[in-house]
Amino acid sequence: MNSNLFNLLLTILTLVITVGGGFLVNYLNQKLGSQKLQDYYNLAKQIVMAIEQLNPDLAGKDKKELAMSKLLELTNNKISSEQADTLIESAVYEVKKLLQNNNLTK
């Protein structure tokens, strides 16, 4: 596959994930409530960053499973697995953006 086609597919995939993530966060916002969602999302970001720092050699799937189980544990299972999955995916996306921006400024 040539690089132009790959870059186009990557751009389309990023757009789909961004738009889909926005809809999922809005859905969760309505379902959980604004403040609770923000608290759970901040917790998810902290979990993702901690796992990335403490377990950089784990595979992505294993990191996600660990993050989801930790989020469910810390929220006393007040959210569903699907909600935890969405929060973790959103947190991973934001952390990756932060890391990319940080690498660009160095």
Image (cartoon, rainbow, N blue to C red):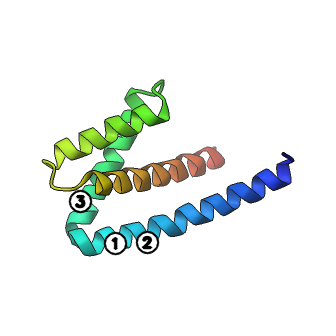
Q: Is residue 31 above or below residue 70?
A: below
Q: Mark 3 or mark 1: which is in front?
A: 1
> Which residue is identified by label 3?
39
Left or right position of 19 against 2: left
Measuring 61% from the left and 59% from the top, which residue is drawn there?
Answer: 14
Residue 69 spot, x, y in % from top left? 26, 39
The amino acid type, in three-letter code, at marker 1 is Tyr
* SS assignment at label 2: helix
Left or right position of 76 against 95: left
Left or right position of 39 against 15: left
Q: Nearer the viewer, residue 26 or 42?
A: 26
> Which residue is identified by label 1?
27
User: Which badge, 3 or 1, comes first in the chain's sequence?
Assistant: 1
Q: Is residue 34 above or below residue 58?
A: below
Residue 53 spot, x, y in % from top left? 41, 32
User: Which badge, 3 or 2, comes first in the chain's sequence?
Assistant: 2
Pointer 1 and pointer 2: residues touching (CB < 8 Å)? yes
The amino acid type, in three-letter code, at marker 2 is Phe
Measuring 32% from the left and 45% from the top, which residue is drawn there?
Answer: 46
Query: What quarter of the picture does the N terminus occupy?
Result: top right
> Which residue is identified by label 2?
23
The amino acid type, in three-letter code, at marker 3 is Asp
For label 3, the crowd category at 10 Å Cα-Cα, with few meaning under 14, some 14 to 19 and many 20 or more, is few
Q: CA distance from mark 3 to mark 1?
A: 16 Å
